[in-house]
Amino acid sequence: MKILSLIVVATFLCCTNVSARCLRDTAVNNAQPSLEVVYLGAEGDDLLFTVKSDNVSAKTIFAIRNEAGDDIYRTWQSDANAIRRIRIPRSTVRTLHFILGSRKQQCIKTFTINTSIVETVQVKEKER
């Protein structure tokens, strides 16, 4: 009888422990993913960005698309939190969409690129 009681108690404790782990993992995975994109500036003919993502679940895609919806950059993200530094050729885009998402959720940040070259002309009279 004592052995049967010990088996029942041990089984109950084991099931309780497994259930607690599942609830904790579910709570972590239900956190909203976040995407932070910071424009760092231009270097030569490239635009530089830092991209930080948090609370990312498995099977999440990180992509950068142009105004036509074509992927410029695309990868699977396996880390829950990641920081990337990305270079994009300046001449190829006017609008960038940074997308972090799965089938259930998406975070999108959009940047408009306006490249203009300003020419300054100075005319000075030469002294004699």
Image (cartoon, rainbow, N blue to C red):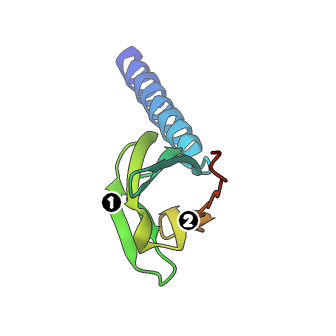
- Name the residue beneath numbered marker 1: 75
Q: Which quarter of the picture shows residue 85? A: top left
Crowding near pointer 1: few (<14 within 10 Å), some, many (20+)?
Answer: few
Q: Nearer the viewer, residue 69 or 2?
A: 69
- Alpha carbon of mark 1 to alpha carbon of mark 2: how far? 33 Å
Q: Residue furthest top?
A: 2
Q: Is residue 60 visible to the viewer in this orientation of the structure?
A: no
Element assignment for label 1: strand
21 vs 69, nearest the viewer: 69
Task: Identify the residue at image location x=47%, y=29%.
Answer: 17
The 10 Å Cα crowd at callout 2, few under 14, some 14 to 19, many 20 or more, is few
Of callouts 1 and 2, the N-terminal one? 1
Vertical order, 59 against 43 (above or below): below
At x 37%, y 24%, the residue is 7
Q: Position of residue 99 (x, y in %)?
A: 51, 64
Q: Contact (CB < 8 A) between labels 1 and 2?
A: no
Q: Circle 2 is placed at which residue position? A: 117
Asked whether 44 or 123 is in front, the reply is 123
Q: Amino acid at mark 1?
A: Thr
Specify the quadrant that holds the C terminus: top right
Point out the image quarter for the N terminus. top left
Q: Does residue 46 sit above or below 68 in this rendering?
A: above
Mark 2 secondary-structure assignment: loop
Give the residue displayed 64% in from the left and 57% down from the top. 122
Residue drawn at x 66%, y 53% as measured from the top left: 124
Q: Residue furthest front?
A: 128
**Rendered location of residue 58, percent (x, y):** 39, 53
- Decide if residue 6 is in sight here: yes
Check disc 2 and give the amino acid type: Ile
In the rendered image, residue 66, in percent from the top left (x then y), is placed at 47, 75
Instruction: Give the answer, above or below, for where 50 lies relative to 10.
Output: below
